[in-house]
Image: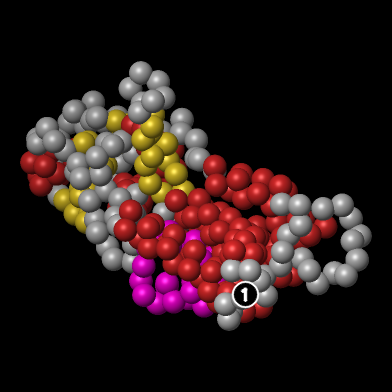
Amino acid sequence: MQKKIFIFPVLTVLAIFLVKQVSAHCPLCTIGAGAAGVGAIWLGVSKVVVALFIGAFAMSMGMWFSKIPKKRYIPFQKTIIILLIFLTTVIPLIPLFKAIGPLYLSFIGEYGKTYAVNYSLVSSALGGILVLSSPKLSKTLTKLRKGKLIPFQGVILTLLLLIIAGGIIQLSLTNLGSGVVTGSIERLSPSEFEKVIQNEGVFLLNVHTPYQGQIDGTDEIIEDWENIEKYMDKLPKDTSIPIAVYCRSGRMSEAVAEDLKEMGYQKIYDLDGGMNAWEESGGKII
């Protein structure tokens, strides 16, 4: 069973605890990060890029509010405030921009291992880390310039880091979580579906839960259709390989087909009516 990778969220928490003194961002940085996120949505860029700016906004807001209390009432007070605001901002919003994709690590095991990664969650943590590090970078820049400050230096530096990171993500993950639909789903009749799966290059997937038989030639059976991303290592590593999906009635396979498209698969065939329609048309279930 697959495990989601949460490397960047863990690093975000560690980074906050390892910073001896957290420098709070000004309201302009917070507003700037939020405005950049809104702009990213308006431009229709990848969901993963939007998540980057959500994480940046959440971290900037947390750093800003952590400076409001003038006295320290509990140990790690600033750190706790930042974490609370970051998590309570990101966690409710991330499901709206969820983008699950594969990460293949060839050096694990004999044949490698594929993990399902919530790229939006990782991206939001990266946005938080960039905002967390920008005050220190700004101080370093000022020191290098012998005390001279560029107007709105902190805001410019923060937005520049986010824009560069967002651009790299957008170019690297063009088929994942983009505002433009890149994959396609075709709902096929049993006769059409039969012709499609005769092609050896098509991956045949049974997602009915619990198991109630299968069509001959099925490549994989998924035991939990609602969490298809857990089975990333059992799906084709190449997202250009067509996937033909079916269940008992067509309800589960229809939902899974949408998930597969979100995961970056470019061509999905869905058996309309599922195994019930298949049997009615004379097909056999084994």
* Residue range of the region highlighted in magenta in the rendering: 33-54
Residue 25: percent from left, percent from top = 67, 70
Q: Is residue 42 magenta?
A: yes
Residue 140: percent from left, percent from top = 62, 61
Residue 130: percent from left, percent from top = 56, 59
- The residue at 58%/55% (across/down) is 129
Q: Amino acid at mark 1?
A: Lys
Residue 228, picture quadrant:
top left
Viewer-proximal residue among 5 and 228:
5
Whether residue 269 sits left or right of residue 1 in the image: it is left
Whether residue 233 sits left or right of residue 7 in the image: it is left
**Above or below, comparing residue 60 to residue 169 in the picture:** below
Estimate how packed mark 1 is, as few (under 14), some (14 to 19) or many (20 or more) residues with alpha carbons within 10 Å. Answer: few
Residue 103, picture quadrant:
top left
**Above or below, comparing residue 25 to residue 165 in the picture:** below
Residue that mark 1 sits on: 148
**Above or below, comparing residue 12 to residue 94 in the picture:** above
- Can residue 227 be seen in this snapshot? yes
- Can residue 228 be seen in this snapshot? no
Q: For the image shown, how many numbered marks are present on the structure?
A: 1
Residue 183: percent from left, percent from top = 24, 56
- The residue at 30%/50% (across/down) is 264
Residue 205, picture quadrant:
top left
Viewer-proximal residue among 168 and 244:
168
Q: Is residue 232 magenta?
A: no
Q: Secondary structure at mark 1?
A: loop
Whether residue 184 sits left or right of residue 61 in the image: it is left
**Above or below, comparing residue 139 to residue 228 in the picture:** below
- The residue at 62%/50% (across/down) is 12
Image quarter (top left, top right, bottom left or bottom right) of the C terminus? top left
- The residue at 50%/40% (across/down) is 4
Whether residue 284 sits left or right of residue 264 in the image: it is left
